[in-house]
Image: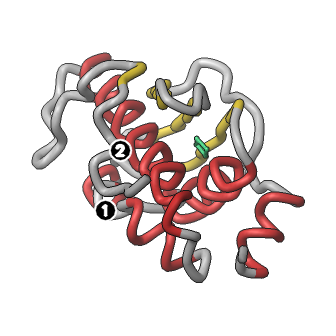
């Protein structure tokens, strides 16, 4: 049911941990499953993401998507990092079971929340980046069927 890549990133998560004095930190959660994800970004003066780390208190798919998301945004500019959507993360993981799609959405939202935090701290606007709705919210389940 899970791809090899998902299993690999779940069992050997990349970039787990924190960044001290991070340029941006974002925390998001899913009220239904209670899982929480926090992303730390280290962004240099040219707006390039030098490092990205995560802490996830959640399911295996959430751990795997956080891990893959950190790999995908590293080395990218903040603008490019906006393209790291949950779809991009899922594709990089060779897919996720439908009931686990919301886990990948957490990864996208955590990146956006961290970028928002960075933008606010530096008084800049990142084109195309919307304010995270809230740190913990529950309106992301629409695409799922029960
Ligand atoms: Fe909630 Fe995976 S079950 S993030």
Q: Quadrant of residue 70?
A: bottom right
Q: Is residue 21 above or below residue 114?
A: above
The extreme front residue here reads 146
Distance in Å between CA atoms under marks 2 and 1: 26 Å
42 or 10, nearer to the observer: 10
Q: Is residue 136 left or right of residue 95?
A: left
Identified at 52% across, 59% down, the residue is 99
Q: Secondary structure at mark 1?
A: helix
The extreme right residue here reads 11
Residue annotated with mark 2: 141
Q: Quarter of the image containing the N terminus?
A: bottom right
Can residue 36 be seen? no
Residue 80: which disc? 1
- Residue 2 lies, in percent from the top left, at 72, 74
Can residue 67 be seen? yes
Q: Is residue 30 left or right of residue 97?
A: left
């Amino acid at each position: 049911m899970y791809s090899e890549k998902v299993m690999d990133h779940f069992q050997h998560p990349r970039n787990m941990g924190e960044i001290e004095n991070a340029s941006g930190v974002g925390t998001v959660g899913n009220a239904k499953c209670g899982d929480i994800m926090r992303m730390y970004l280290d962004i240099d003066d040219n707006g390039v993401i030098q490092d990205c780390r995560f802490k996830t208190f959640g399911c295996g798919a959430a751990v795997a998507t956080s891990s893959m998301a950190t790999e995908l945004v590293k080395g990218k500019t903040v603008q490019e990092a906006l393209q790291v959507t949950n779809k991009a993360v899922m594709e990089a993981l060779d897919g996720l079971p439908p009931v686990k799609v919301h886990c990948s959405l957490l990864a996208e939202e955590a990146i956006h929340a961290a970028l928002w935090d960075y933008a606010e701290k530096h008084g800049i606007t990142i084109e195309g980046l919307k304010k995270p709705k809230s740190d913990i919210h529950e309106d992301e389940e629409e695409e799922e069927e029960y």
